[in-house]
Image: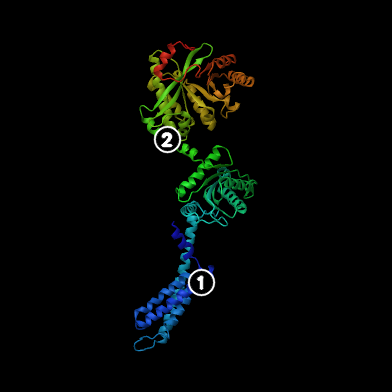
Amino acid sequence: MSTKSDWIIEKVFSNWHTSDRKIQVAVAGIIGSMLLCSAILVYVTGGTQYSYIHIVYVPILVGAFFFGAIGGISAGLLSGLVMGPVMPLDATLGTPQDPLSYFSRAAAFATIGAIAGIMFLALGRYLKIMRSQAFEDPITALPNRTQLLDDISRAKGRPAVLELDGAGRRPLRIVIVSIEPYSRVLATLGHDYADAMMRAAVARLKSDATRDAKFYDLREGILAVLVRSQSTNETVDYAHRLAECLGEPLIAKGIPILAECRFGVAGLVAGAGNPVTAIRAALAALEDAREQRSLVAVYDADRDDRRRQTVSLLADFQDALTSDNQLRLLLQPKIDLEKQKCSGFEALLRWHHPDRGNVPPDVFIPVVERTGLMRQLTQWVVRAALEQSVRLRREGTDLPIAVNISVHDLERSDFAEWLESQLLKFGVTPDGLEVEVTESAVMWNPDGALRTLADLRCMGIKMALDDFGTGQSSLAYLKDMAVDVVKLDRSLIRHLNGDSRSYALVKAVMDLSGSFGFATVAEGIEDAVTSQRLAEVGCRTGQGYYFARPMPADAVAAWLCSDTPTA
């Protein structure tokens, strides 16, 4: 809603009896002047027998508009008096009016004024209710996002427009406050308790807030504060003070709730950008605070730009899935550390963007995993791996290829059935394909993941637990996992040389895996000493740049025949 519309609703349709006395006197004087002018016009045009007498409805309606029913009745009676005994029926002949006529006219004027006053009062109240619903949150009674957008729009256009009490002309900044337990309280206790918690939080924050701050309710669990401060550091200090306000538990319908919160801070530049961009900047800072596990984060344009570029990759990645030359699989050999022979390959995805060049997997895969594209990606990888398996067998290399699957695949009840259909389609036996899954993917939905892993294992496909040592799996789940192989993350073996504790840890993992009947694969081997020490503690298989870098399928045969440590 525009600023002009706001002014009409807030000022024109308000009852003037609550306004300044000088304004009331001025409006009353205007109404009296209108009555006088109306009387002069009626007299000059011939008297009350002519239609010009109806012009008195204007001051009557104005009186009703500004003063309600009392104003309308008063203006109506005054109009009846002015158009009554002192006003002739015919000014030219001096014919007087019939008393019954002007008394009945005065009564009609007063009645019209009363009805108009009541209608204007009802209209004003209705518009106030409509404005409250449009600009105010019904739970916390705070201005909502629409009001915030309007306030920022006015403030950014003219920095002095949004004058907060005592703030002067200091720079305006926005602070986004996330009451983190909101979703959890909503899910466990329901809306009543979540709403009560938010009302308690708002009351606590407003009671200790500075006068130059205005609070808004953006959505469930998210508040915003417009505050004027001299510097970003001052705003960060203000956010810390707000956090201190919420240090004690909030009481929601008798239940104490510890309100952990996070803050995002962004500044506003007069005349630059738009309100939506300003709020988005503060929300981006809030997301940074969550990612960094910090209390407060200030908007970082470079970080935000990188995040937006990463998200923009999604549209490009969808095109890559249907392109013939953007996505490709490279194969990294797995080496039998005892025999120093290649025992299989891991398929690694690479993306060559037409404009950005090579995009690292750790940049685009985490983004894709949060969308429905992950299912399509898994299907592409599996089919490409099976095609390469067929090609390698034609060249005389009959070694399994391992592919990685995601949490989305584990949640599919038909994933094992689909994978079996692909094996039949390409004519690859189950022992020609291995499936790797991370700890975090299994722990996302342990029951469903374990069922899918068991189904795959029943088909004869070897299962590997990838990146072991970086996830959240417990020994209770580890013993129940339907896996054949545990792959040690490179972080576990990085300091294996010269670090006795790392050596003891890896050996303990080897012993544990052996007791469960799991084979082990070490990732990230980069030197001969690490390879030798892994063999000493019982690790059977390894992979890493020490042996070979990932290579296209058409280079595998030549590599196997070359004079390498693994030949």
Q: On the image, which quarter does residue 377 sit in?
A: top left
Residue 487 to residue 306: above or below: above
Residue 116 to residue 404: above or below: below
In this orientation, does residue 230 appear? yes
Q: Residue furthest right?
A: 248
Residue 44 to residue 151: above or below: below
* Three-letter amino acid code at the position of disc 1: Gln
Query: Horizontal and vertical percent for residue 63?
Result: 46, 73
Residue 342 to residue 26: above or below: above
Q: On the image, which quarter does residue 356 sit in?
A: top left
Query: Horizontal and vertical percent for residue 11?
Result: 48, 64
Query: Horizontal and vertical percent for residue 349?
Result: 44, 26
> Dot 2 lies on which element?
helix
* Lower position in the chain sequence, tag 1 or tag 2: 1
Query: Horizontal and vertical percent for residue 515?
Result: 60, 18
Which residue is denoted by mark 2 in the rendering?
314
> Dot 1 lies on which element?
helix
How far separated are the C-alphas under marks 1 and 2?
62 Å
Mark 1 Cα-neighbour bin, 10 Å: few <14, some 14–19, many ≥20: some
Left or right: 53, with 227 as reference point:
left
In this orientation, does residue 489 appear? no
Residue shown at the point (56%, 37%) measured from the top left: 292
Counting labels gives: 2
Which residue is denoted by mark 1 in the rendering?
24
Numbered mark located on residue 404 in the image: none
- Figure colour scheme: rainbow
Mark 2 Cα-neighbour bin, 10 Å: few <14, some 14–19, many ≥20: some
* Three-letter amino acid code at the position of disc 2: Leu
Residue shown at the point (40%, 87%) measured from the top left: 98
Residue shown at the point (40%, 77%) measured from the top left: 56
Name the foreground residue: 359 vs 400. Answer: 359
